[in-house]
Amino acid sequence: MLAGTTGAPPAGAAGVGGALGKVSAKVRERVAAGGTATFWVMLRGSDDLAAARKARGKAKAAAVLRDARAGAAADQAGLRRLLTGRKAAFRSFWIADTMQVTGDAALLAAIAGRPEVKAVLPDEPVRLPVARAAAVRQAVEGAEWNVDRIGAPRVWAERGVTGAGIVVANVDSGVQFDHPALAAGYRGRAGDHDYHWFDPAGICPGGVPCDNTGHGTHTMGTMAGAGGVGVAPGATWIAAKGCENTFCSVAALLAAGQWIVAPTDRNGLNPRPDLAPDIVNNSWGGAAGFDPWYAEIVRAWVAAGIFPAFSNGNGGPGCATAGSPGSYADTYATGATDVNDAIAGFSSRGGGQDGAVKPDIAAPGVDVRSSVPDGYAAYSGTSMASPHTAGTVALIWSAVPGLRRNIAATREILGESAIDTGDTACGGTAGDNNVFGQGRLDAHAAVALAAGPAGSLAGTVTSGGFPLAGATVRVDGPVQRTLTSAADGGYRFGRLPAGDYRLRVSAFGYDPVERDVTVTADGSVTAGTDLPASAAGVVTGTVTSGGTALPGVTVALSGTPVTVTSDDAGRFRLAAPLGDYELTARPLGGCSTPVTRRLRVSGDHREDLDLPQVTDRSGYRCGPATDGYRAGDRRLDLAGDDSAAEVTLPFAFPLYSQARSRAWVGSNGLITFGAASLSYTNTALPDAAEPNDALYPFWDDIFLDDRSSVWTSAGPDTFVVEWRDVTFFLSADDRLSVSAVLHADGTVTYRYRGLSGPRGTGISATIGLENAGGTDGLAYAHETPAVTDGSGVTFRPPHL
């Protein structure tokens, strides 16, 4: 749940400190404006799922219900007493340590002061992804192209497996239960909708399942629809309406998530965990990044043995666009491919939580025809891709009941059977990357791997007897699979169909080695490989720009793993096998332009590189900072989320030819001159939308917790603003300190230290400066990892 943008405070105002630092600025403003507001209280709960993880079968969901209820009762007891005593309206959930409360400023302060309260967030809905109307493509022998592409019809024909005995669910906009493609598979088809349908907001008349957007009927059709639209047409389905319309309220999504573990009657009473589904599809999600608000629900599903299928988001083609909760490590997220097996432009790329590869897999998501209320339609989106994965899991569990609710083994089978599709544009390897995940979904191969005789193949890759990491290990036989050796040189194909394989091990800088291996049913084969080194040369040089040595420049040989970084003097050294290459030099930030040139390595060689300098239209330029980190000595009264304070400058600071004597320091890592800004949604530069007329040392959704502070320091010709040990609203474990030094001559230097976690590198930040109209500006970085511990950048005006 992202905090929203609020209006600017009056000049000189500061953020609320103390306990109210836990409270989103948007909540505070809503309470101040309306007297009362509805908000969400996040508690510091405990893990109550240990017993469920050890249980088996249907007992897993029962254990989640029992223990999560007991844990929530204990964790929420103190706050419940406060709210009851104040006669406040509130709603609690046992599946997550979260409570929805409506209250005034006094109640808000009392809640924020409680030690078990972690944060207070605004009540804002999640937008249901807009399904893009698409072309209807020719069906293939009675099955839609997308269903045929993943091999589902072969599973039906060769094995007689259609998903029978497996219950799938979706949390979506609802389902037309009597649609011809879905009526026979609905668990409540006898007319009793209790335990088979849940509408927490009461949108559908008479408690009868409905779908007022068409999205949920479409995704359910792809999972379990008859007539060639569904992957697992023999599966049984149930549904929870977590989205009231094109928006999904937090309350509805939490209630739906809770119902999945223990379905209730239509009134939300008398839970029956024995009727929990096996698989739940979630074709919805929020903004890119890691927003943990739904993490407890997903953990509960996994503990209950319910497979959590999610769409990866429609934020592509940029990297780091995976939507949350699909970006969670515990979810199984699917990206979208088209009829040519290419990744869809809109398909979000990873990585995900803590660097996890996302998506986990890719499946058809373009021009997917499926059921919609009273008909059929073709849509595009990762919403359409994820149901293919959910349906494939239904086929696997139907074919091999012993795998049912074994999520770890099922994830392994999906990954091992996927068709490797190498695209490392956003990181990863050919067999596991942030564009396709572990490859393209192959339902036929997945069921064959799960159901047939299989064994494992493992080994260690070495060179000269020493472990070799990053080697490509490929097997060709009954199936084709590719892995990359780990840091210790090890690799393991956990499950391969029994048969004869050709094993090929290769690595850049080494001569490849091939051999034959035989995998036997239930057997384990060990195949170690030692690679001889290839003949090589050494390339050295210095990287400069405008006559200045550039540190931190990435120098690489395109198409190879050879990558080095220039040192503080701009020097680099790399070794490569003899041959022809493209040598690229890419600076850490946007002060210089990357260069590429042809290079022949026939022995040792020197190659100096000069990178063209970047300027904006006004003539501002930037380069490496040479002075050290400057700390502040006067603390500003800023705390919590989204706040600002006015400061008086000791001199008239010139920015784009306009002298400024006062400024506003924002908690979100920016300094504005025209007016205060609480904006946490950073943009590229320049941008006509507010804020403008600003310096952006590190513009991001920053949160000032008890360890964080903002400081200034004034000198005769310098003014320092320091954000010290700050964290992030969406990632409390990531931290950094930022120092901005304004010089009387218009020069500005940003310095960084104390980085902890990926957000501190700038992957979600904007760094630069901009004029008053938003028509000119110079960006050092926009949502790219351009910051390292101890790094810095200096901006110089045109006259210097």
Image (cartoon, rainbow, N blue to C red):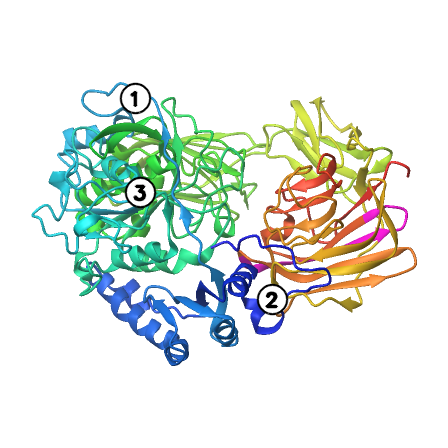
- Mark 3 or mark 1, which has the lower sequence index? 1
SS at circle 1:
loop
- Asked if residue 5 is among those painted magenta in the image, a careful observer would answer no
Mark 3 and mark 1: Cα distance apart in space = 31 Å
Q: Name the residue under label 1.
A: 136
Q: Is disc 1 surrounded by few (<14), some (14 to 19) or many (20+) residues within 10 Å? A: some
Dot in front, 3 or 1: 1
**Viewer-nearest residue: 170 or 410:** 170
- Asked if residue 739 is among those painted magenta in the image, a careful observer would answer yes
Instruction: Count the labels in the image.
Output: 3
Read off the magenta span. 731-748
- Mark 3 or mark 2, which has the lower sequence index? 3
Q: Which residue is drawn at 72% across and 41% down?
A: 780
Can see residue 601? no
Q: Mark 3 points at which residue?
A: 413
| Residue 494 percent across, percent down from the top left | 34, 45
Q: What residue type is labelled 3?
A: Ile
Q: Is residue 369 above or below residue 795?
A: above
Q: What residue type is labelled 1?
A: Val
Q: Mark 2 points at which residue?
A: 705
Q: Which amino acid does label 2 sit on?
A: Asp
Q: Residue at x 26, y 48 (%)?
A: 279
Q: In which quarter of the image is residue 164?
A: top left
- Mark 1 or mark 2, which has the lower sequence index? 1
| Residue 344 percent across, percent down from the top left | 43, 29
Residue 174 appears left or right of 756: left
Residue 83 appears left or right of 677: left
Asked if the residue under mark 1 is in contact with the one under mark 3, i.e. CB atoms within 8 Å, the reply is no
Q: Is disc 2 surrounded by few (<14), some (14 to 19) or many (20+) residues within 10 Å? A: many
SS at circle 2:
loop
Residue 490 is marked as: none
Q: Residue at x 16, y 29 (%)?
A: 227
